[in-house]
Amino acid sequence: MDETSGGSSDDETSAVGGQSLRGSSIEIDGACQHITTDGFDFSFTTAKTASAASSFGDFGGTWNNTWISLGVGGGTFPCKLDFSGNSITTTCPVGTKDEVFSGSPLAGITFNYDGADTVSGVVQAWAEFSATRR
């Protein structure tokens, strides 16, 4: 990731082929403007609203995510993530409309923490992630 100019000193931005991700210790924003027949076009912003003691360092606290999705089942979907102590919990409304998923794409997210340096997980079987502390 490259440092951005004009932002706080910890802002970092990455952009590749219509996808972008910008992060700092208080906000993470992303977008994917790769429009396909499936309508894969979304953006999100995640802002830290409160701090908490956590083994996740700067991530400790409450983060509010707003996911905006176009296409089938699209809309604006809120989600809250809490990083506290050694745990991560989420509160994301979810439902279906006409048998199509409707709700935050983060609903159903799972986190696995090894107790030392690595967090990994899955979001509704469509995305996997992992992070290792440096």
Image (spheres, helix red, strand yellow):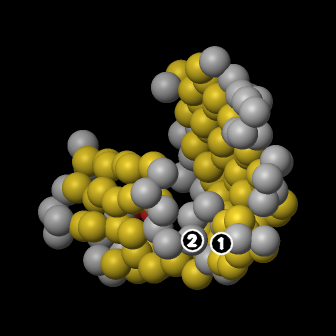
Query: Is 60 situated above or below 89?
Result: above
Report the amino acid beneath label 2: Ala
Q: Give the residue pinned by disc 2.
A: 107
Query: Is 62 situated above or below 48?
Result: below
Can I make out residue 4 in this image?
A: no
Q: Is the Cβ of the residue at disc 1 closer than 8 Å to that at disc 2?
A: yes
- Residue 57 rendering spot, x and y as whole percentages: 37, 62
Instruction: Using the numbered discs, state the Cα–Cα distance from disc 1 to disc 2 in whole angstroms.
Output: 8 Å
- Residue 53 rendering spot, x and y as whole percentages: 39, 78
Displayed quadrant of residue 31: top right
Q: Residue at x 50, y 72 (%)?
A: 108
Instruction: Tell me the mark number nearer the camera, choosing from 1 and 2.
Output: 2
Q: Is residue 96 left or right of residue 118?
A: right
Q: Give the residue pinned by disc 1.
A: 79
- Residue 23 rendering spot, x and y as whole percentages: 58, 43
Q: Residue at x 58, y 81 (%)?
A: 91
Pointer 1 or 2: first along the chain:
1
Q: Residue at x 26, y 49 (%)?
A: 133
Q: Does dot 1 land on a helix, a strand or a loop? A: strand
Report the amino acid beneath label 1: Cys
The tally of labels here is 2
Q: Residue at x 67, y 66 (%)?
A: 101
Q: Residue furthest front?
A: 98
Q: Does dot 2 land on a helix, a strand or a loop? A: loop
